[in-house]
Image: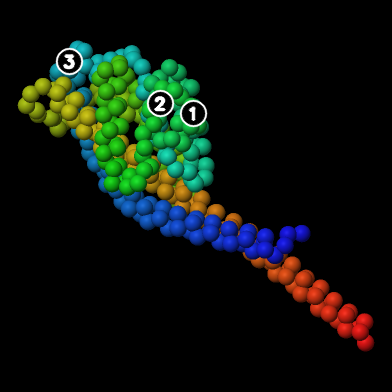
Amino acid sequence: MENLKTIKNRIRTIDSIIKATNAMKMVSTAKLAKVNNSSKFSRRCCDVLREMILKAVNEAIFKDAIDQDSWLNRDVGKSLIVILSTDQGFCGSFHQSINEAAKKVAAEYNGAYIEIFGKKELHSTRRSMARPVDIAGPGRMLNAIAFSKAVAGIVMEYVIHHDVTDVLVISGKMKNMLSQNAVCTKILPIERRSVIDSECISIDGSWQEFIDSAFGMYISRLFVSIVTEHLVAEYSARVMAMDSSVRNANGIRDELSILYNNIRQAKITQELTEIVASVECIQ
């Protein structure tokens, strides 16, 4: 049986864990509220830019204004899979869901280029061709836009210089506070419509330059939306994981406290019994 000092030390350790997990839970809850507002705004911007891109591309195709060697005219090419993970843990099964979705998509698009952002997924997949990028460092929400632009630049480089025709992004998304899952967002190929909308777009200059510029802007804003939604899922997963950890730690602490009190009471009873027995022997 454990002695009182050992049990007391274990209770102190549990108390420290409870304080740490409570602090992580509060920080993640505060960040979640902030990121969620940014995510909703980015999603609305993406919807507007996407409609503009679709109109511009389809009208340029209708007018036969696309360059012959443009990336828009590629019918056959390679695929690019972008995987977003994190550098931090304590997210429950969040990383596992992204890992499983990434393996499924990679198996479907065999031979695709793969870019992994985040050490957790990089360590899980062990792909030598991946480049880890820190998206979980200090002040990452301040750098979310800069990070999104950097990823968008990498994607555009693949599209323009590596004959990429399909671009897919594996990231996290929050269904509700209790559930987060991995989603696959398909960026390319662009949807092509057979009928042009009544509202035509008028531009000065080259259609190809306009589409390249507009598509780069759209990709950049789209990744801001994807990254912020990914962070929302990560923070909500961490909040739930820390909440579960606190409840479990409190349960263990209660059990240890009961055990501590029982052992202490048993020792007190034993000492009283010995004292009474000694008095009776003297008498």
Tell me whether the residue at label 1 lies in contact with that at label 2, contact meaning CB atoms closer than 8 angstroms. Answer: yes
Closer-to-camera residue (118/63): 118
Q: Residue at x 93, y 87 (%)?
A: 283
Lower position in the chain sequence, tag 1 or tag 2? 1
Tell me whether the residue at label 1 lies in contact with that at label 3, contact meaning CB atoms closer than 8 angstroms. Answer: no
Q: Secondary structure at mark 3?
A: loop
How would you rate the neighbour count of disc 3 (Cα within 10 Å): few for under 14, some for 14-19, many for 20 or more? Answer: some
Q: Position of residue 185 (x, y in %)?
A: 37, 32
Q: State whether residue 168 appears in this view.
A: yes
The amino acid type of the residue labelled 3 equals Asp
The amino acid type of the residue labelled 1 equals Thr
Can you identify the residue that label 1 sits on? 125
How would you rate the neighbour count of disc 2 (Cα within 10 Å): few for under 14, some for 14-19, many for 20 or more? Answer: some
| 181 over 195 or under it: above or below | below
Q: Position of residue 174 (x, y in %)?
A: 42, 45
Q: Secondary structure at mark 1?
A: helix
The amino acid type of the residue labelled 2 equals Ala
**Comparing marks 1 and 3, which lies closer to the viewer?**
1
Can you identify the residue that label 2 sits on? 130
Closer-to-camera residue (97/157): 157
Q: Position of residue 170 (x, y in %)?
A: 41, 32
Can you identify the residue that label 3 sits on? 67
Q: State whether residue 50 appears in this view.
A: no
